Amino acid sequence: MAIDKFSKQQFEDALPIHNKTGKQLWEYAGFIQGEHCYNVIVAQGIKIHIRSSIDNSGYAADTGQDSIRIWLIGDNGKPLGGKLSKWVTRVNGWDTRMTEQLRTFWELARKSGYCPKCLVPRSIYKVKKAGPNIGRQFCKCNSCGNNFEWLT
């Protein structure tokens, strides 16, 4: 399948808006390392960071390695946990797949919440080691090392 060469405007049109008010739920994070980036604010100190693959031409890059990438970050811009999913490929239907991933990340971030001890956002990880819990997601506090909880 061929890579879809969508524009910055088409990408922004695919980002989430409030279903009742129409208010955009995202903010422009800037042009970072050669691509336009966006954040969806989940809660205080928790954001979904999106790297669009749209370069300075205003269109998605030609190469397959520049896919749409999504992860959770804190207010400091650092990741809240590990890599939870693969990239979103930029073939036909990328907007639907991106929306599905954003919804998944939103739910995971809301479920993980904050550490009841030190009140910072908990980080989310996926078990990668072989065994009965492989693929399961969990959250824990990286600040105090407590409050482990399975999310799935």
Image: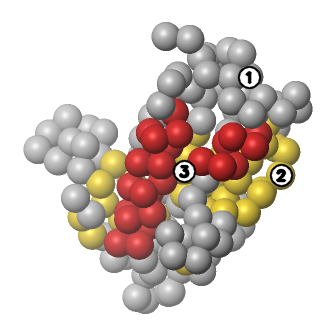
> Residue visible at 50% across and 69% down?
19
Give left or right: position of 51 versus 130.
Answer: right
Residue type, label 2: Gly
Q: CA distance from mark 1 to mark 2?
A: 17 Å
Q: Which mark is residue 37?
A: none
Mark 2, secondary structure of its residue: strand
Residue type, label 3: Trp
Residue closer to the observer: 22 or 110: 22
**Residue at mark 3:** 71
- Residue farthest toward the right in the current orientation of the protein: 56
- Residue farthest toward the left in the current orientation of the protein: 132
> Residue visible at 70% across and 53% down?
38
> Residue visible at 29% across and 46% down?
127
Question: Residue 105 placed where, x, y %?
Answer: 44, 57
Q: CA distance from mark 2 to mark 3?
A: 16 Å
Say whether residue 50 is visible. Answer: yes
Q: Is residue 86 above or below residue 82?
A: above
Mark with earlier residue (1, 3): 1
Q: Is residue 68 above or below residue 27?
A: above
**Residue at mark 2:** 30
Question: Residue 74 placed where, x, y %?
Answer: 62, 67
Mark with earlier residue (2, 3): 2
Question: Residue 1 placed where, x, y %?
Answer: 49, 10
Q: Which mark is residue 61?
A: 1
Q: Are marks 1 and 3 in contact (CB under 8 Å)?
A: no
Q: Disc 1 vs disc 3: which is toward the camera? A: 1
Q: Disc 2 vs disc 3: which is toward the camera? A: 2
Give left or right: position of 151 versus 108.
Answer: left
> Residue visible at 54% across and 50% down?
71
